[in-house]
Image (cartoon, helix red, strand yellow):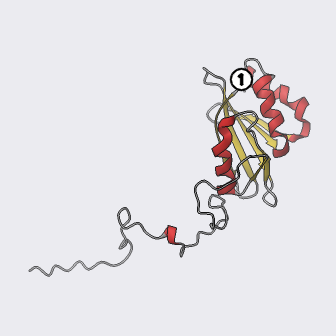
Amino acid sequence: MTEPQRAIADAARPILGADLLRAATDAGGALVLEVKAERVVELLQMLRTAIEPPVSYLADLHGFDDGQNLAVIYHLFRPGEAFEVRVKAVTSRQRPTVPSVMDLWKGAWWPEREVMEMYGIEIVGHPDPRKLLLPEDWQGYPLRKDYVYPLDHPYLRPDPIHENPFAGAEQDTSDTSR
């Protein structure tokens, strides 16, 4: 861990206490802060305003399923630098909830909706929880590891233009032109 990364982790520990589950660096050198979901806004606010220079650019957020817990992962950068902090907000599978970060970044609007739709993580406080990608009658959360795709659903039928409907089936290779 570099000195600036250590300073951020050390600043987060007294604020979050035991709710800061992990502070480490990943293989690419990014600082990874894992926090209980209910405290994520507090940590993100600290990174945005209380750290100098701030880690204030939200590049992306997405859902994550490790098979036991669900999480929302936020990719943050310092503007103009290759300094990344990845915040992982961990929540339970039984009642997955994470607070919205719309008050900090308006650009979280659609990614938060995707997380709700594809992982079933409720984003508490999001102003528009409608689906973006799936039909309204879709059941379940397709990006969860335990999701079973309904093969009889009309949207999951083979695409005859892009998929070979005969793939895997025995094909007649006899040449009748002789």
Q: How crowded is mark 1: few (under 14 residues within 10 Å), some or many (20 or more)?
A: few
**152 lies above or below 72:** below
Left/right placement of residue 40 relative to residue 162 reads right
Instruction: Name which residue lies at 87% across and 31% down.
Output: 13
x%, y% of residue 106? Answer: 68, 36
Near-viewer residue (145 or 2)? 145
Near-viewer residue (57 or 5)? 57
Residue 6 appears in the rendering: no
The residue lying furthest to the left in this view is 178
Which image quarter holds the N terminus? top right
**154 lies above or below 144:** below
Instruction: Name which residue lies at 80% across and 39% down.
Output: 40
Near-viewer residue (133 or 20)? 133
x%, y% of residue 70? Answer: 74, 53
The residue beneath circle 1 is 2
What's the residue type where badge 1 is placed? Thr
